[in-house]
Image: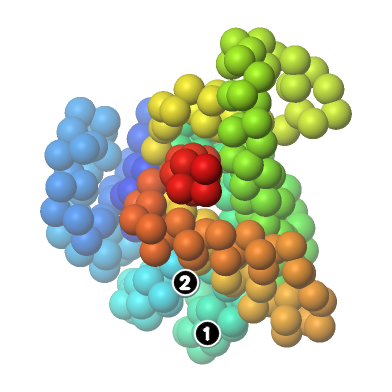
Amino acid sequence: MRVCVIGLGRMGRGIAVNLSRRGHVVQGFDVDPNAAGRLSGTGVKVTSDATQCAEGADYVILALPTGRESLEVIRGIVNVAKGVILDTTTISVNELKDVMQVINEHGLRYLSVRLEKGPREAERGELVLYVGGDKALFDASMEVLSQIGTPIYIGSHEQATALKLISNVILTANAVILAEVSALIRKLGIDPDSVVKALSMGGSDSAQLRARLPWMLKGSYGESFSIKLARDVIDKALEYAQSTGVQLPLTTLINELLRLAEASGYGSRDFSEIAEMLKVNEKVTK
């Protein structure tokens, strides 16, 4: 099977490496000229442009920062993309409408494939996929989808897209609460590993607790999902909620905290580093 991956950041790169390892002919493209170097020795061939990558591919996987880039790429490959487009980009529902207009105008085959989990799981083929679109196309694409991770058919493109935004609201809110209480936990003087072990065995357990609370307690952070990207996704979720008439007051407050963190110079850091901003504020208020 021939696969093209457009967008070779942490997630796209992981997907490309995973599929190459499984025996597929994988090409990739990224606007970053350093992308080829990062994929050296993986079997993934990096092309000079998106059109060259997409031409002749059975599947074109988009793993881009925002819906703006997704729309731009789709417009650029409409004449050569004969395979199925699997768009893993986290986009807003309004951006989705623009994308679908182009898809429908050109008769392209397209599935919304919104991703859960991170770069490590991408490389292992252990992502969770919220898939929206035509059910028959979903069924026909199961071979490649199941090698990327665990595909779950959600329903329409809008339903899959909105559910991903809701998921991000939940995980971001969880991480912000953990950042807030991490200061209190540090005051207790308990061994961080014991804290995480105890809390993960009770009702407060969560993926964010297990992954990010250790970083917060030890002040040593990984790089996975930036504050800037987290804020962008929450913006999209609030925009969608407003369009449906649903109020999200707590999410609005969390978004303000993300904006403050971004304005304070934390924008490129993992969103769990809000804990570090709260440490600074704690010192200032003493």
**Residue 98, label in figure:** 1
Secondary element at image label 1 = helix
Residue 29's spot in the image, x, y percent?
Answer: 26, 55
- Tell me the amino acid under the disc marked 1: Asp
- Tell me the amino acid under the disc marked 2: Gly
Is residue 207 shown to the viewer in this render?
no
Question: Which quarter shows the N terminus?
Answer: top left
Residue 128's spot in the image, x, y percent?
Answer: 64, 42
Q: Residue at position x 42%, y 32% from top?
A: 221
Question: Residue 204 falls in which quadrant of the image?
Answer: top right
How far apart are the two marked residues, 1 and 2, measured between alpha carbons? 9 Å
Task: Give whichever of discs 1 and 2 has the lower sequence position.
Answer: 2
In this rendering, is residue 270 above or below 83?
above
Q: Residue at position x 72%, y 33% from top?
A: 206
Q: Residue at position x 18%, y 33% from top?
A: 40
Answer few, some or many: residues within 10 Å of disc 1's Cα (few below 14, many 20 plus, some between 14 and 19).
Answer: few
Residue 5's spot in the image, x, y percent?
Answer: 36, 52
**Residue 214, label in figure:** none
Residue occupying the far front of the picture: 286
Secondary element at image label 2 = helix
Residue 163's spot in the image, x, y percent?
Answer: 72, 60
In this rendering, is residue 25 above or below 107?
above
**According to the image, label 2 marks what residue?**
67
Question: Residue 246 falls in which quadrant of the image?
Answer: bottom right
- Callouts 1 and 2 close, C-beta under 8 Å: yes
